[in-house]
Amino acid sequence: MLVLVLKVTAVLVAVRLLVRWLRRPRSNNPFASDARQSVRPLVIDQKARDRVIKQSFSPDRVPADLDAIVIGSGIGGLSVAAIMAKAGKKVLVLEQHDQAGGCCHTFIDKGYEFDVGIHYIGNLNSQTSAKTLIDQLTHGQLQWAALDDEFDTAVFGDKRYSLVSGRRRWLEHVKKQFPDDTDAVDRLFEAVVKCKKGAMGMVLVKMLPVWLSQLLLQTGLFNLVSDVFKWNKRSVQEVVTAETNNKDLQALFMYCFGDYGTSPDQAGFPMQATLLAHFWHGGSYPVGGASEIAFHMIPVIEEAGGRVLVRAEVKELLMDELRSTVVGVKVAKGSSTHEIRVPMVISNGCTIRLQRLLPRPVAETSRLWPLTKMSHATAGFSVFVGLNAPLEEIRGSGDSTISPRNWWVFTNNDITKVCNDYMALSADEALDRDVPLMFISFPSTKDPEWEKRYPGKTTMAIVTLANYDWFKQWENERCTKRGADYEGVKNTIGDKLVAQATRLFPQIRDHIDYVSFGSPVTNNFYLGAPRGEMYGMDHNQERFSGESQTLLRPATDVPGLYLTGQDILSCGFSGGLYGGVLAASVVLGRNCFSDVETLHKQLKKAA
Ligand SMILES: Cc1cc2nc3c(=O)[nH]c(=O)nc-3n(C[C@H](O)[C@H](O)[C@H](O)COP(=O)(O)OP(=O)(O)OC[C@H]3O[C@@H](n4cnc5c(N)ncnc54)[C@H](O)[C@@H]3O)c2cc1C
């Protein structure tokens, strides 16, 4: 009886707080009207692009009377800044690298351009609410190109499978490839659908007050609203192996775990279910490459008087005299530092910033401190290959056809074991083995404007997981000056990856004109990722438990400090983007999710 009374009371309090929250004073609606403009031609002149994405920090470029500073110009930082700007706020984004974009930046070397962290994004092949959101944050200038209908190919040893776009078609296509296991396919698909249904629960616990979310979770009441945390108690591996003994089918429901980097026996099922559903309608790629993202979001931030300045590493958060409230940042510029005072600081990233930027006594007493002890996501190793031939010349045929799609290549179908075994090797042992997982794509083929920008050339990118400890000894050495031993380890792994990829695509062999490798310590330098991690915090079950998700929210318990980006929702362009929407909702005091949704519906009706 007592439990029932407690449960009813908790629900009533929750409803009351929600109503109060919905009625609280609001900033301007950032999505009050349609901000799209007619699409202008792609800006190809690199100098003109650099004038937008490479504006170097200097104290005289800092606007006066700022409303906020955002640390980090990844999609999580740019999106919160752009939404705030659309609500009339003046925001300064500070980026440690020499260009804006974070994982969405690109680099050009010896006449080839490469993206760093964008290969495909789901949910953008039609006018979805996500597309409306991006349209509004880029004045409608960011365009998307669809990948092939068969957007992913999974290779397990000598077997190949593919995934096609369209939810029903996806299911039927998988069944066609597993004619003896159609019941298991149905059950697995159903598990994804069911689990995905409750996924909004992950956002809900961040929107309610901390104490209320904790109460609802502890009493079990939260399960009445969403069962997502129940699902999270079961790993991807557990759910999949419970439904089928067919190793290939198991692997096909887990193959893309590299998109969040956590092994299927460590990740909770909701992560995989959300990811599979995210790509049910295929993949898209930004026309003109990933740097288009920052290129079109920066003007929106500038329109309200804000700026995005690079070569601006934030070294420290400034506190008030009582050392309780964040009141600004200390920025390094060469050997000097500059203090900038603002009413609020929003950090694009959680654990690392808290550990490094807050005074230790403040950080240690924050409720977030235990979370900063959680592991980082897996480190990544990237290979960038330039081919001196246009696609028509090297397209190939049959299984080797090069086209706008991704290849997930595993050495066998026991994908969890083979990857875990590899990651547990010492550096010396790893140098002797084939790399068990390769994500391969040809980014230039995905961009319809590529041929105009880089005629006669094609690019290939390979990404794999790596153990940070293989490279740790060089983490404090200067980039490009890490010495022969480092180059030896990096080149051995990199050369292996190129050789393995060439076995799949033999037609590229005589066209390899440029090769460059990005190790985990490269990520450390360019992405500000302390353990070379690709996706911020580890996407394991602990991170996605109700308790952790409740605390991983934009508002911290340090007044003046907020969080955005992949650490407060999940990795991926969309995870970082919606992390920004969540952060904007909190700092603007209004539900920006429903603001976008309302505009989206209006535009759809009018179309
Ligand atoms: C190799 C790779 C491939 C990927 N492929 C895809 C894909 O195909 N599709 C997809 O959707 N997602 C992909 N992702 C993931 C996706 O790119 C990221 O999850 C997302 O972009 C993260 O956005 P973010 O804003 O949270 O963080 P980030 O983009 O990491 O931004 C954080 C920024 O903060 C800056 N910073 C750090 N410390 C400081 C400081 N002290 N002062 C100032 N600035 C600082 C960093 O330099 C960085 O620019 C990939 C990621 C990687 C690494």
Image (cartoon, grey):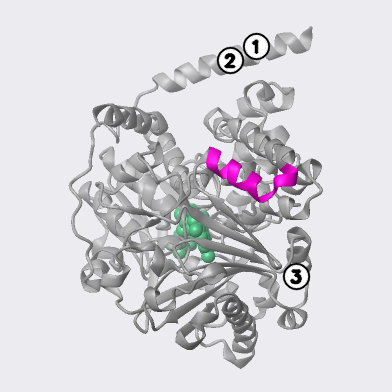
At horizontal 52% and vertical 14% (from top left) the residue drawn is 16
User: Which of the image's four quarters has the C terminus?
Assistant: top left
Q: Residues within 10 Å of mark 2 (few under 14, many from 20)?
A: few
Q: Which image quadrant is residue 11 in?
A: top right
In this rendering, the label closer to the viewer, 1 or 3: 3
CB under 8 Å between discs 1 and 2: yes
Identify the disc placed on residue 9. Answer: 1
In this rendering, the label closer to the viewer, 3 or 2: 3
Dot 3 amino acid type: Tyr
**Where residue 440 sits: x, y (%)?**
55, 68
Q: Is mark 2 within 8 Å of ligand 1?
A: no
In this rendering, does residue 485 appear at all?
yes
**Where residue 406 sits: x, y (%)?**
52, 62
Q: Along the polypeptide, which appears first: circle 3 or circle 2?
A: 2
Q: Residues within 10 Å of mark 3 (few under 14, many from 20)?
A: many
At horizontal 45% and vertical 43% (from top left) the residue drawn is 578
Residue named by callout 3: 422
Residue named by callout 2: 13
